[in-house]
Amino acid sequence: GESVGLHLPTLSVQEGDNSIINCAYSNSASDYFIWYKQESGKGPQFIIDIRSNMDKRQGQRVTVLLNKTVKHLSLQIAATQPGDSAVYFCAENISGYSTLTFGKGTMLLVSP
Amino acid sequence: DTGVSQDPRHKITKRGQNVTFRCDPISEHNRLYWYRQTLGQGPEFLTYFQNEAQLEKSRLLSDRFSAERPKGSFSTLEIQRTEQGDSAMYLCASSSKGQGIGNEQFFGPGTRLTVL
């Protein structure tokens, strides 16, 4: 498989813009999805989750959209702030199984 | 702070030495997971406990790796005869069945291992 190594896909935005981070998941049997935020040197931090019987779920400043037809997940962050700068990972899970399978991360850079 | 805690946060060791990491999950969580993360990659699943029972192990978990959760609370991950390829961030997560809409896992800060 392709090795991303240090070259993460990067999204650069200005403070106050809306950000959209995309993720393609791999397993059509997955029925639960989570977005995590990971700052440098820290563990992943839960942001928002969604089940496969939903196509949209909203949190505080964040919205997750799920398109099962094309196995695509997106995270929308409204009014992006410098504190949102981090690497964002999507993770998928099949109910009844313990494993979270993480996608390739996207680095979000927010400039003031 | 009532989140997942891990100790130590950083460990530097020489190749061939044994190391042990500890994870304290969120107190009411009965499920505990270990993951490994290398630079630029997402976490990769290693093993999973429900209470004290180790129910699943990844093929990434070689014979040199062993994990325990003797009383169903904290867990330890031991790596014997460390190799340079073991250098990574070791993450612990916990969850509770029936909480939330799915298998919502909460992660600790990780232990960064460097093998010289």
Image: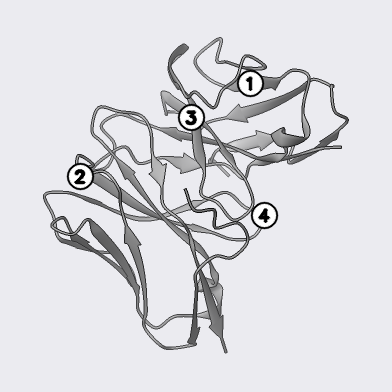
Q: B18 or B59, which lies in front?
A: B59
Q: A109 or A1, which lies in front?
A: A1
Separation of residues labelled 2 and 3 (CA atoms): 23 Å
Disc 2 + disc 3, Cβ < 8 Å: no
Residue wearing tag 4: A41
Q: Relative to B55, say whether B36 is above or below.
A: below
Residue wearing tag 1: B76
Residue type pointed to by label 2 = Ser
Give residue B37's position: percent from left, percent from top: 59, 43
Residue type pointed to by label 1 = Thr
Residue wearing tag 3: B33
Residue type pointed to by label 4 = Gly
**Circle 4 SS class:** loop
Instruction: Please check whether the numbered discs 4 and 3 fall on a single chain.
Output: no
Query: What's the chain of the residue with tag 2?
Result: A
Give residue A18's position: percent from left, percent from top: 36, 83
Give residue B51's position: percent from left, percent from top: 43, 16
Residue type pointed to by label 3 = Tyr
Q: Please say whether residue B101 is visible from this viewpoint.
A: yes
Badge 2 local density, few (<14 within 10 Å), some, or many (20+)? few
Disc 4 + disc 3, Cβ < 8 Å: no
Name the residue rendered at 35%, 29% in the picture.
A98
